[in-house]
Amino acid sequence: MSGKNILMVIAPDKFRDEELNHPRQVFKQAGESVTVASTRKGEAVGMLGHREKVDYDLNDVAGKTFDAVVVVGGAGAQTSLWGVSALHDILRRHHQMGKVVAAICLSGAVLAKAGLLKGIPATVWKSDESLSVYTEHGVNFQDKPVVRSGKIVTAQGPFAAREFGQEVVSALEED
């Protein structure tokens, strides 16, 4: 398998470096192409100092189709991604088309707020806020590093970033 196109969405500030870089390495080793987008173009800065040049904002990618949409976590996800309706729309559209949708760390809440996790097993970085969102949206929270439910993959945090990337690739292989 190769040649799948993956959209990775990061917060413009305080995304988690490993949650972008480790899955991206896994994706590229599998022969996939990766597009990085955020809520704004320019330079995004990770929590550990990684600087990522972002050429696409969510409006640029909203009408495009990807084989997978992966939402990266980190502290910035809560303030910059959780409530973004354009991102929710992108995720819902891809899910409806049978594409892989995935989120790591605090970004699991983005999938929940988009209405994609109701009644299914999923995980998230455990914070009062993220667990509250999961409860509010009827998510079957699993306290595990990575959880896959069909074409939806969630992971808890940086320690699970490589396994998360591998699980996304596995989900893509079933297309």
Image (spheres, helix red, strand yellow):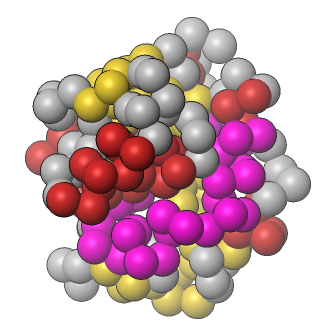
Question: Which quadrant would residue 141 be assigned to in this image?
Answer: top left
Left or right side of 57 for 124: left
Horizontal and vertical percent for residue 120? 43, 21
Q: Magenta span covers which residues?
A: 66-93
Q: Position of residue 53 (x, y in %)?
A: 52, 81
Farthest top residue in view: 174
Q: Is residue 76 magenta?
A: yes
Quarter assignment of residue 155 = top left
Q: Which of 120/32 is in front?
A: 120
Could you tell whether 42 is left or right of 18 in the image?
A: right
Number of marks: 0
Front residue of this view, candidates 79 and 145: 79
Please tell me whether residue 20 belongs to the stretch shown in magenta.
no
Residue 114 image point, x, y percent: 60, 47
Tell me what residue is drawn at x 87 percent, y 54 percent: 63
* Percent coordinates x, y for residue 32 in the rendering: 56, 38
Q: Quadrant of residue 18?
A: bottom left
Q: Residue furthest right?
A: 63
> 163 or 114, which lies in front?
114
Residue for point 70% across, 22% down: 98
Q: For the C terminus, which image quadrant?
A: top right
Residue lying furthest front:
136
Residue at 61% from the left image edge and 68% from the top image edge: 84
**Quadrant for the N terminus in the image:** top right
Q: Would you say residue 111 is visible in this rendering?
A: yes
Q: Give me the residue at 80% from left, 59% from top.
A: 62
Observer able to see residue 29: no
